[in-house]
Amino acid sequence: MSGDNRFMGLIYLSPYILGLMVFTALPFLASLYLSFTNYNLMDAPVFTGLANYIKLFTADRTFRKSLWVTLIYVFTTVPLKLAFALFMAVILNYKLKFINVFRTAYYVPSILGGSIAIAVLWRYIFADVGLVNMGLQLIGFEPVNWFGDPTNALFTITLLRLWQFGSAMVIFLAALQSIDKTLYEAASIDGAGKWTGFVYITLPLITPVIFFNLIMQMVQAFQEFNGPYIITQGGPLKSTYLLPIYIYDEAFKRFDMGYASAIAWVLFVIIMALTLIAFWSSRHWVYYAGDKRG
Amino acid sequence: MKTLIMTAALFAATSLSPLSLSTASAANLRMSWWGSDDRHIATQEALKICGAKFGHTIAPEFTGFQGHQEKVATQLAGRTEADIMQINWPWLPLFSKSGDGFADLNQFKDIIDLSQWSKSDLDDGTVKGKLNGISVSTTGRVFMFNKTTYDKAGVPIPKTWDDLIAAAPVMKEKLGKEYFPFEGAALDARLVVVLRTTQKTGKDLIDPATNKVAWTQAELAEGLKFYQTLVDKGVIESWKTVAAGGNKPLHENQKWAKGQIAGTYQWDSTYGKIATPMEKGQELVPVKLLTIEGAKTDGVYRKPSMLFSISKNSKDPKAAAQVLNCLLNDPEAAKILGATRGIPSSKVALDTLNKEGKVKPVQLEAYKRVMEPTSPGVSPLNEHPRVTEVFDTNFEAYAYGQQSAEDTAEEIIAGINDALTGI
């Protein structure tokens, strides 16, 4: 490499590195420092040691409730969404007429799903006099209190997330299409049916993609904000009060940046821990090309 | 390379030229506010007039109310706030605890004609002796009823709480069980409880002398039970039912538009907003506060609807003061702004609007309902985010039947006192 070009790669990368430092790394570290302070935006931060964390774990009932709701939400939506995305990908992997139209149609909710407009639409669809209840009444059922009942509210929010299965589906679809068809032919000659082929050929071969989708969906689910914030504002009775909403309320409604930063760091540690567990467990169920395991 | 240097020099010279040509007195200012379209249009027009009078240019920054507080807070933290700001009165304890959060407008009394405001108006904007903001208008909660629905049911518009409760069964019998003479959940329900308890005790929620809850547990518990009475008697929909509708604001609620919900307790300045979506032929009337026998006060919840403040970081606070004075006291600006921020507190602005017939009779009627009744005074801490969080969380639990009125009152009082410690 000539002297003139020695730093070319670094120059090309510098806008990204600069952006990463200024907009991610710096706030990341700043929030760690702020989590040990009492900071209300107006006055300078005052160092308070572990006070925020002690309050969080010993005296904050809202945090406990919010953490519980968040865990239920994540452990419900992630497996359901992955299963549904895989199911749809398998169907859309068949050579059907207008298959590209179907693929596009099923992907569209993923583009729109996280938007404010869709959240508002969701609020109208599931309202007491909304489309869903009208449909239920048409077929003879009683209308359901989707938002006012604490048990149903989280389910309604979960449905909005499941509806956005498109991005995971596209990744599954790409993985399914990369599987060598001769494997199925060989299995078929040996008498394997479609289900056996799916369980013993498809699933093992797409485990790296399942693993990737699992990590991505889990991280995204922990960070869910738009839907519940617009639709239920975390209610009723904090039944949809996910941790990101709690962080936002503490930071921008009650201006307790120190406490909000502490919650954000606890959330980060939870996500990191679960990701590490997933990576550790992947040794037992994820199979890569050239893997010699029996 | 030569060309590049020449181009850069030319660019720098041209971009700096407006600065070098500007006169010493002319200033480039920014003004931020929240509101609806009519306010946005009128304010931009008024800023042009006021800017032209002094040779200043004022860049407008406007949003809806939702999210505006967060925007102002982050701007204040980053010292990038606008020179002139529309500030919500309850934000003063948050943004200017010691009175140093905004410029002290007393320093500009040779520019701003402070004689146009009453002492009480100026006191409302004063923190620790510093005039942090000037009251633009006064607002308060008033009762408004759908006269058309009440007439159809053959029920007179209520004057007392008992009248209101008595209206429910008649209205349901005559018009159907989906009809309610009143509404209340979340904020509206909290303010009904506050009103009722203030009327009975003669005290506001927060005692300004101690910054603690002024009510006893029994007094607050009675107020909470009154809310439950309204639900049980079919006067208002339950909290759960309102939540089922998606917690839509009143002006987006179909039941309100159709007249099935026939009464509310709202800010007087929202009359236009909630009257507009009502179906054709329906009449909304603001009335006097409902009364109760043995009340110690009318209990009106009256406060400055908003303040105009000047940034303490403004590079040209005198220019900002000139514009602020123009917006609030100049007859020409007053005519343009009309009642887009409520009925003005400035005497000269109010006189101008009255002379020009710029205030609708029904707006004046609602304003009268706010200004006439007695009140023990309202602390800005009533709307402190920690106070509302504690109140609403526990109140909701009570409304859902998860805890008793007594336990709820105890939790609210302890929570608020704890939250306000040190404020």
Image: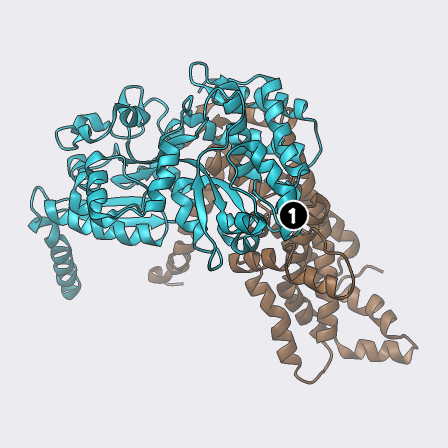
Chain colours: A brown, B cyan
Would you name the residue on which mark 1 appears? B172
List the single residue furthest toward the bottom.
A97
In the image, residue B386 lies at what x, y percent?
Answer: 51, 29
At 19% across and 46% down in the image, what residue appears?
B333
Please indicate, yes or no, whether residue B201 appears anywhere in the rendered image.
yes
Q: Is residue A68 above or below residue B124?
A: below
Indicate the secondary structure of the residue bearing disc 1.
Answer: helix
Please indicate, yes or no, whether residue B34 appears anywhere in the rendered image.
no
How many marks can you see?
A: 1
Q: Chain of mark 1?
A: B
In the image, residue B298 lies at what x, y percent?
Answer: 45, 26
Q: Is residue B408 above or below residue A234?
A: above
In the image, residue B199 lies at what x, y percent?
Answer: 50, 24
At 12% across and 49% down in the image, what residue appears?
B52
At 74% across and 74% down in the image, what residue appears?
A91
In the image, residue B232 lies at what x, y percent?
Answer: 68, 37
Image quadrant where one finds the N terminus of chain B: bottom left
Front residue of B240 and A7: B240
Front residue of B80 and B307: B307
**What amino acid type should be assigned to the residue bearing mark 1?**
Lys
Image quadrant where one finds the C terminus of chain B: top left
Q: Is residue B111 above or below residue B148?
A: above
- In the rendered view, does B17 fall on the left or right side of A145? left
Quadrant assignment, res B138:
top left
Judge the density around disc 1: few (<14), some (14-19), many (≥20) Cα neighbours within 10 Å: some
Front residue of A279 and A239: A239
- In the rendered view, does A57 fall on the left or right side of A12? right
List the single residue furthest toward the right.
A191
List the single residue furthest toward the top.
B209
Q: Is residue B111 above or below residue A150?
A: above
